[in-house]
Image: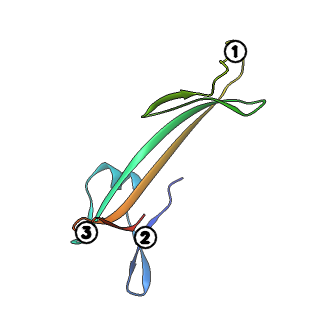
Amino acid sequence: RSFGIFFWEGDRLKPIPVSAEMLLSAPFKLTNDSTLVGSRQIEVSGIEPKMGKVLYRCSANGCETGGGGFGEESDEILVVRRVQQTVRSIDPLRGIERWN
């Protein structure tokens, strides 16, 4: 689920008519002193469902195993895919974060 993005203007909160996906796909400048930066991270994990042991976790940084081996091919593995999007507003002249 994607949540709305808002900014504070004077005495009220105003929606920005874009999604995090749109912000991450192209350079975006809110004002002269505010630029958006961010990332999208995808991670896949394999979990042994009976004991809840994480067997492996793979991301853009590579794969890590939980040790102990995977057992037979007939063993059940729950595969979980997690997508995280982070968008931050920064002051490009001072290098400070305004919001995330």
Amino acid type of the residue tagged 2 in the rendering: Phe
Quadrant (top left/top right/bottom left/bottom right) for the C terminus: bottom left
Q: Residue shown at 25%/55% (left/top)?
A: 27
Q: Secondary structure at mark 2?
A: strand
Q: Is residue 61 above or below residue 27?
A: above
Instruction: Compare marks 3 and 1 and give the one earlier in the sequence.
Output: 1
User: How far, Cα to Cα, is label 3 from label 1?
Assistant: 53 Å
Q: Secondary structure at mark 1?
A: loop
Other residues around mark 1 within 10 Å, as few (<14) / some (14–19) / many (≥20): few
Q: Residue furthest front?
A: 67
Circle 3 sits on which residue? 94
Between circles 3 and 1, the one closer to the viewer is: 3
Q: Residue shown at 67%/25% (left/top)?
A: 77
Other residues around mark 2 within 10 Å, as few (<14) / some (14–19) / many (≥20): few
Circle 2 sits on which residue? 6
Q: Secondary structure at mark 3?
A: loop
User: How far, Cα to Cα, is label 3 from label 2?
Assistant: 23 Å
14 left or right of 26 in image: right
Instruction: Compare marks 2 and 1 and give the one earlier in the sequence.
Output: 2
Which of the numbered marks, if any, corresponds to residue 90?
A: none
Circle 1 sits on which residue? 71
Amino acid type of the residue tagged 1 in the rendering: Gly
Residue 54 position, x and y percent, is 65, 32
Amino acid type of the residue tagged 3 in the rendering: Arg
- Is any part of residue 17 visible from this angle? yes
Q: Are marks 3 and 1 in contact (CB under 8 Å)?
A: no
Q: Is residue 36 above or below residue 25?
A: below
